Amino acid sequence: QVQLVESGGGLVQPGGSLRLSCAASGSMFRINVMGWYRQAPGKERVLVATITNGGGTNYADSVKGRFTISRDNAKNTVYLQMNSLKPEDTAVYYCYADSAFYGSRYWGQGTQVTVSS
């Protein structure tokens, strides 16, 4: 139905930037909301940012002002621009997509982001 593939993770120094991409394929017209979660070692998966079909966005307090979520509908791709990265941003980042029509949430495979000097 919907397949998600993330890319763009890696190792970056504190204060640096990364841009994550989430390429979607399948029944995209059934998708209502897309976004990103992250999971640090030994911790629960937490919501980072969301974006609706209409372009409405929402962010976790911990990333407001530093991260920006956007989408390119022509490319079926969602981006997460991460600036002023901190060591506490280190986690596996997962893209997700919600479909009210299918009553399902779809997940990507995850991409590792490590912030370290």
Image (cartoon, helix red, strand yellow):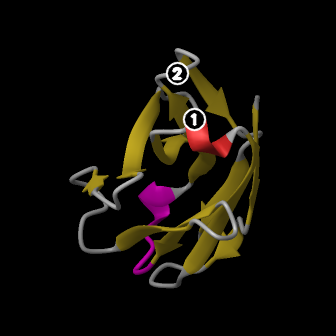
Q: Is residue 18 magenta?
A: no
User: For mark 2, what is the residue?
Assistant: 101
Q: Position of residue 104 (x, y in %)?
A: 57, 18
Q: Residue at x 31, y 61 (%)?
A: 63
Question: Which residue is more in the foreground, 58 or 13?
Answer: 58
Amino acid type indicated by mark 2 = Phe
For marks 1 and 2, give the CA distance: 6 Å
Q: Nearer the viewer, residue 101 or 64?
A: 101
Residues under numbered marks 1 and 2 in contact, where contact means CB atoms less than 8 Å apart? yes
Quarter of the image with the N terminus is: top right
Q: Residues within 10 Å of mark 2 (few under 14, many from 20)?
A: few
Residue extending farthest to the bottom is 16
- On screen, residue 82 versus residue 97, left or right, reads left
Give percent across and percent down for residue 98.
51, 31
- Res. 30 mark: 1
Is 84 one of the magenta-colored residues? yes
- Residue 76 appears at what percent x and percent y? 66, 60
User: What quarter of the picture does the C terminus occupy?
Assistant: bottom right
Answer left or right for 71 relative to 1.
left
Q: Residue at x 27, y 50 (%)?
A: 60
Above or below residue 13? Residue 87 is: above
Name which quarter of the figure residue 85 lies in. bottom left
Magenta span of residues: 83-89
Residue appearing at x 24%, y 73% in the figure: 65
Which circle's residue, 1 or 2, is located before the other in the chain? 1
Q: Which element carries disc 2, helix, strand or loop?
A: loop
* Dot label at residue 112: none
Left or right: 10 in relation to 97: right
